[in-house]
Amino acid sequence: MQQVERRMRSEFLVNRDEILMTQREWADTPLRERVAVIRSLRKRIASDARALAEMVPTRLPGALNRTVADTLVSEVLPLIEACRFLEREAEKILRGKRLGSRGRPFWLSGVESTAERVPLGVVLIVGAANYPLFLAGVQTIQALVAGNAVLWKPAEGTTAPAFALRVLLIESGLRPELLTLLEPEVDSAISAMEAGVDHVVLTGSAETGKAVMRQLAETLTPATMELSGCDAVFVLPGADLEHMVRALCFGLRLNGSCTCMAPRRVFLVGMNDGEASRLEKRLVAALRGLLWVPAPPNSVDRLRELIADAREQGAEVALDGMAAFEESNVVGVTLISRAAPSMLAMQVDIFAPVLSVMRTADVGEALAANAACPFALTAAVFGPEGDARGLAGKLRVGNVLVNDLVIPTVDPRIPFGGRGRSGFGVTRGAEGLLAMTAPRTIQVQRSRSKRPYEPTGDAHVELFAGLVGMLHGSGFGKRLDGLKRLVSAARKLR
C-alpha cells in the first residue's frame, strides 16, 4: 500500500491536464453510460462484499475491534444501496427541463428556455476516518455519475478501502483518470486546492471546516461541509422509555461513539424529579456495561475538561469515563445528570461516549436550552408520534429522527447535512446528486423584433408604468386603468 501511495503522490499535479480533458469527455458521455458503470460496481461489490469490508481497518480511531460485520452493515450495504438509488433515479434527477409558456412573462413570448444540470468539473473529496468507505464512497459515486472527475483524499490509515473501491470502479469501466487517490496527509488536500478544483466536499470537524473555508475563500471555490455534531435527544411524556434507553446505548456504542450523529445531550421534557431520577438510574445501569474505547490524547484531554466543568457548575457525574483509565488513552462512558446549557458538555463536539441529561419543565424550555448549542446536525425525538412530529417541526437541524437514532439516515434517498457549526450543503439523495452539478440555462430568442434594443427615454415611463399596473394592479379597476395608460403611451410613441 505504501508503494501505491508513493505512485499517487503527485498524480493530480502531474496529470492535471489529462484529468481535465478526460473529465470533459466523461461529461459528454450519455448519462445512461455513466450510470452503467455504477450498476456494474454494485454487482462487483455484491459478489464479494466481505472482501471489501475487510479492507476497512478494524482499529479505526475510537472504534476498537470494529468487526467485519459492523463494516458490512454500516458501510458496505449502505454504499450498495446508494448505487441502486443512482441507477433508478439519476436520469430523472439530472434530466434537463424545457420551460414552457406557462408563467413566462408575455413580453418574452419569443424566448424558449431550457434549464439543465451540468458537471462542476473536478471535485475534491476529503474523507473521514470514522466511516472511510461509506461517506466518501457515496460522495464519489454521486460526483462521478454527475459527470465530474474526483480527487479523493482518504483519512490517514484508510487508504486501503479507497484504493479497493477505485479498483472496482476501474474494473466496472471507469477511466482511471476520473478518480485520483491523494496521499492521506493533510498537505495533499491543501496542494490540490492550491492547484485548483471546482468543488470541495469535506467530512470532518468544525475546526477543520473553518481552516478549509479560509483557503477556499482565496479562490471563491464552493464547498459542501459535513461537519461535527453535538446531537440532542428529546424525551416527551408518553415515550417508550425502555426503547429510548436501548437506542441511547446503541448510539453511544456505535463505532466506539465516533459518529457525528451520536447522542450527546438528552432533554427530559415535563418529567418530575422522581421520574427523572428513576430514568437516570436506568441509564446508569444500562450504560455501565458498555465497553471502554480508545481515544486520542486530545479527546482524553477534552473529556477531562468536560467532566471538571460539569462538576464546577453543579452537575452530577453519574458515570465518570475517566475514573478507571486515568493514565491511558482509553475512556469509558460518561453520564452527566442535572446538566445545564452553559456546560461545555452541552456545547462542544467530541468523539467519546459522553451523554449529558438535562431536566426541562416543558418543550419551550427544552427548545431554548437546545438553541444554546452551536451544532445542528441531527436530533431525535422520543414520544407519541403526533407530539414528536410537532416538536420536530420546530428544530433547527438537518435531520430529525422520531423514535429512533442514526440508522434511518443511511436511506440513500435522504439528503444529509447540518446547520450552524455542523456545516452546510448536503450529500446523498437527490439533493446531494444535484449538489455535484451546476445549473445552466439556455434561452433562444425566436423573435426578430428590434424594439427591445431601442433606447428608452421619458416617453417610455408612462408605457412601462401602465404595463406594471395592467399586470399587477390590485383589482380589475386598477388593471384596466393600467391598460388604458399603456395604450395611450404606445400611441404617443408611434
Image (spheres, rainbow, N blue to C red):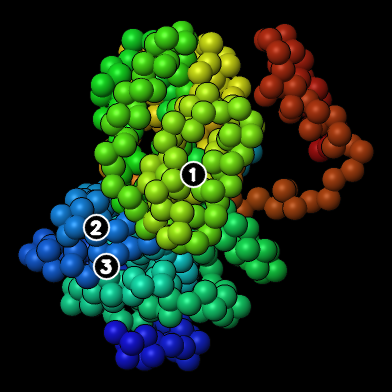
Dot 1 or dot 3: first in sequence order is 3
Query: Marks 2 and 1: CB-CB under 8 Å?
Result: no
Position of residue 464 in the picture relative to residue 405 (left or right): right
Dot 2 or dot 3: first in sequence order is 3
Query: Marks 1 and 3: CB-CB under 8 Å?
Result: no
Alpha carbons under labels 1 and 3: distance apart: 24 Å
- At label 2, the amino acid type is Arg
Viewer-nearest of discs 2 and 1:
2
Above or below: residue 358 compared with residue 22: above
Alpha carbons under labels 2 and 1: distance apart: 22 Å
- SS at mark 1 in the image: loop
Query: Marks 2 and 3: CB-CB under 8 Å?
Result: yes
- At label 1, the amino acid type is Gly
- SS at mark 3 in the image: loop
Residue visible at 53% across and 11% down? 361
**Mark 2: few/some/many CA within 10 Å (<14, 14-19, 20+):** some
- At label 3, the amino acid type is Pro
The quadrant in which residue 312 appears is: top right
Q: Which numbered tag is attached to residue 134? A: none
Q: Which residue is mark 1?
A: 229
Residue 442 visible in the shown view: no
| The one of 117 and 283 positioned closer to us in this rendering | 283
Q: Which numbered tag is attached to residue 57? A: 3
Viewer-nearest of discs 1 and 3:
3
Q: How many marks?
A: 3
Quadrant where the N terminus lies? bottom left
